[in-house]
Amino acid sequence: MENRYRFIRYFAYVLEILVLYMIQQTPGFLPSLMGARPILIIPAVLAIAMFEPELPAMGFGIFGGLFIDFGIGAALGFHGILLGVACYVISAFSANLLRTNLLTSFLVNTIALLVIVILQWLFYYVLYGYDHCEYALVHHYLPRILYSLVLTPITFYFNRAFAMLIRPSDG
């Protein structure tokens, strides 16, 4: 019985990531903020990691990261590795050290988005030797982080509902 609920929950997570990827990649579906569009997958997989064990969380992080790599045309595996490691660490911390609430989710998303997007800017902009690196960071990458952070409560409560409702009853 436990496996059936786990399968349904994981299937729901996969569908969520697929839908968020389609929304993220559809031009004009979400309004742009200062020319930037949000990264919907990162807050979603980080929220999943807060409610699932380490290995499934890492799997969903890799899965979501590969979709981000497909979407931006980046080196395949860059975001997959970063999100896989981030989700594993967040899941381990959530099981042992952190309380799973909105404030914790917001802090985790802030740190993870800053690290991932700054690394993306560093590897795909600065190291390529493009001009005006600071302008790109301030006017493209930082608004993208802020826009993604605004959506953190939605992904947190959505995934919290999945994690709490699709479980076997204790009685």
Image (spheres, rainbow, N blue to C red):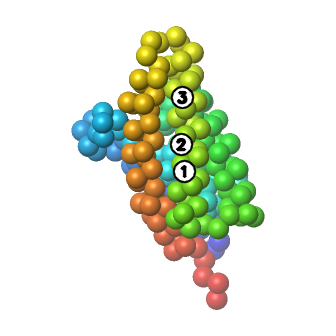
Question: Where does label 2 land, which residue?
Answer: 113
Q: Left or right of 103: which side holds 151? A: left
Image x and y of residue 15, in percent: 45, 53
User: What residue is at 64 percent from the left and 49 percent from the top?
Assistant: 87
Q: Quadrant of the N terminus?
A: bottom right
Q: Residues within 10 Å of mark 2 (few under 14, many from 20)?
A: many
Question: Where does label 3 land, which residue?
Answer: 120
Q: Quote the CA–CA distance across marks 1 and 3.
A: 16 Å
Could you say which is closer to the camera, residue 86 or residue 163? 86
Amino acid type, label 3:
Gln
Question: Where does label 1 land, which residue?
Answer: 109
As drawn, which residue projects farthest toward the bottom? 171
Image x and y of residue 73, in percent: 46, 24
User: What residue is at 45 percent from the left and 12 percent from the top?
Assistant: 131
Q: Mark 2 or mark 3: which comes first in sequence?
A: 2
User: What residue is at 42 percent from the left and 30 percent from the top?
Assistant: 138
Marks counted in the figure total 3
Amino acid type, label 2:
Leu
User: What residue is at 60 percent from the left and 66 percent from the top?
Assistant: 100
